[in-house]
Image: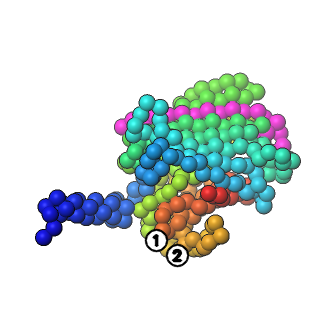
Amino acid sequence: MPPRLLSVMIVMLFVAVNSSLFYVEILPRIRSGQPPSFNVDLADEAGNLRPVVNWKVIVRGEEFLKLRTGVTLVDGEEDEFWLWAEYSQPTNTVLKPARDFLNLKLMRNEFRVHRDGDMLGLQAKVQIESLRGVDFPLTLEISGNVSNGLLSPVVKAESSLGERAFKLEQMDVPASGAVFQPFLPVNRILGLYPGRTWKQPFFDPLSMAFSAGVAQGGMDQGTGSVIAKVRNETVDVVWGGKKIPCLVIDYTGSDLESTVWVGVQNGMVVRQKNRLSESMEWDLIRLN
């Protein structure tokens, strides 16, 4: 018989491993219809190491924007994090047809989440120079906190039409779930399996800004809900010189459609496509 202390350690390890398996593989099946929670990698938290992930954004076969995503600890908090994504224009590039359609100066999106995956709030900033070839400088800022399962976004818009501030309708946020923000690709999505389906709130500051610019101050896009479904078959995606088997999630029912490729082995998001219109499809490709 092994020493009592060793026996206790073995039992505790067994319980921990099976609890993790239950949370990742079984619980999502029990909680049918619930979206996967945000995942903050514990490995990245060790030693405060949170590497930045670089992406490239391809539109019509050309690099349209650069994208960086990452996780940052909220100041003064031990269990809260910012999941952020920042878009910027590539340097030393000439004006491309895609930029003739949308000249985006800057876009930064952030989700505030708890260590256990619960969403606590969000904020976003979009700066546009022109839309469809027409100069229309616009800065849009959105922020909101989650309280009692409801997100209450506030919008500030500044353009040639002046400044405005107003509240959007409250949005239900699922327990331990997330709001789908198509231009904030997350690092990992766990608990997926073929055929899994869920409904999720939808929030898109770029569609809001686009609507405001085209409608000369109106804002009738960018919120609602989406239906997400994991395809039954996996597909191989070439990434880092290797073929990676991926589950594919299709998001439909919003102002735009999105497809996300997620590695089967580790849940890492390697690619995401956002279709804004017939002529504008953003292909977000992970680089590291």
Residue 221 visible at all: no
Residue furthest to the bottom in view is 233
Residue 119 image offset from top left, x and y in percent: 43, 43
Q: Is residue 265 left or right of residue 207?
A: left
> Is residue 143 rendered to the left or right of residue 66?
left
Residue under pointer 1: 194
Give the numbered dot on residue 233: 2
Q: Is residue 108 visible?
A: yes
As for residue 143 lying within the magenta part, the answer is yes
For residue 97, side relative to residue 33 (left or right): right
Check disc 2 and report its element: helix, strand or loop.
loop
Q: Is residue 32 above or below residue 129?
A: below
Pointers 2 and 1 in contact (C-beta within 8 Å) = yes
Question: Relative to residue 259, is residue 85 depicted above or below?
Answer: above
Residue at x-position 56% and y-position 43% = 84
Extent of the magenta region: 130-148
**Callout 2, which amino acid?**
Glu
Q: Quadrant of the C terminus?
A: bottom right
Marks 2 and 1 sit apart, C-alpha to C-alpha, by 7 Å
* Front-most of residues 91 and 252: 91
Tell me the chief SS of the magenta region: strand
Residue 238 sits inside the magenta stretch: no
Residue 142 tag number: none
Report which quarter residue 77 is drawn in: top left
